[in-house]
Image: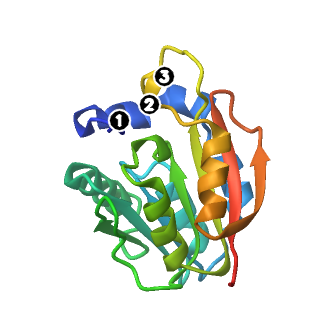
């Protein structure tokens, strides 16, 4: 059973202390977004990562900010508008098993603090693979399965080995892990062509 973040607590996702333990810059370096490219932030919340990526893909790019919670999407939209990014950030509500984007429509995607919430991880990763162009990059960031004061309950955290197995089963390759955050693992994967 997955553990869902309560949208009523969305302000926690924008606290200054998050920037200390999960700064945006390391993700930007891994993704290396360029003007004109298209990205999907799956489980975008209030746009913590989506908005900085949007700033890097203009002109001509898009960031599809996806979430199952309408409240999160509303806040992300508002924050994008305030930063003059509403022509780049497109908010869309995804389902538990579906992403409302066309096949091979994005250059890259990421799931930050979301994997442990997935009800059917393999099915969902196949859906993520569908929207990525061949050789498109996926970054999975999630909580290390160790006891700590913040984050989801320990019993809901997913070990990185299980995430890697699911990624390979869903058709991703080129897996690499990056030790860039103190409380999270970061897994980079590529959508293989076959």
The quadrant where residue 172 appears: bottom right
Badge 1 or badge 2: first in the primary sequence: 1
Q: Quote the CA–CA distance across marks 1 and 3.
A: 10 Å
Contact flag, marks 1 and 3 (Cβ < 8 Å): no
Q: CA distance from mark 3 to mark 2?
A: 5 Å
Q: Is residue 94 left or right of residue 55?
A: left
Percent across and percent down for residue 105 are 50, 84
- On the question of residue 4 being in view, the answer is yes
Residue bearing mark 1: 3
Q: Which structural element holds mark 3? A: helix
Disc number at residue 154?
A: 3
Say which residue label 2 marks.
156
Viewer-nearest residue: 91 or 184:
184
For mark 3, does the 10 Å Cα neighbourhood hold few (<14), some (14 to 19), or many (20 or more) residues?
Answer: few
Query: Is residue 8 left or right of 169 when viewed as pictured?
Result: left
Q: CA distance from mark 1 to mark 2?
A: 6 Å
Q: Are marks 1 and 2 in contact (CB under 8 Å)?
A: yes
Picture quarter with the C terminus: bottom right
């Amino acid at each position: 059973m997955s553990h869902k973040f309560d949208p009523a607590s969305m302000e926690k996702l924008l606290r200054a202390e998050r920037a200390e333990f999960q700064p945006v810059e390391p993700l930007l370096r891994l993704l290396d977004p360029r003007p004109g490219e298209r990205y999907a932030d799956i489980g975008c919340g209030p746009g913590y990562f989506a908005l900085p990526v949007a700033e890097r893909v203009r002109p001509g790019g898009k960031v599809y900010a996806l979430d199952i919670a309408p409240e999160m999407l509303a806040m992300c939209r508002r924050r994008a508008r305030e930063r003059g990014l509403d022509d780049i950030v497109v908010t869309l509500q995804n389902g538990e098993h579906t992403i409302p984007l066309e096949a091979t429509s994005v250059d890259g995607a990421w799931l930050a603090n979301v994997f442990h919430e997935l009800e059917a991880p393999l099915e969902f990763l196949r859906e993520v693979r569908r929207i990525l162009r061949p050789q498109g990059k996926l970054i999975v960031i999630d909580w290390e399965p160790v006891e700590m004061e913040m984050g989801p309950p320990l019993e809901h955290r997913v070990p990185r080995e299980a995430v890697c197995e699911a990624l390979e089963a869903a058709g991703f390759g080129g897996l690499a892990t990056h030790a860039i955050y103190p409380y999270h693992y970061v897994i980079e994967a590529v959508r293989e062509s076959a």
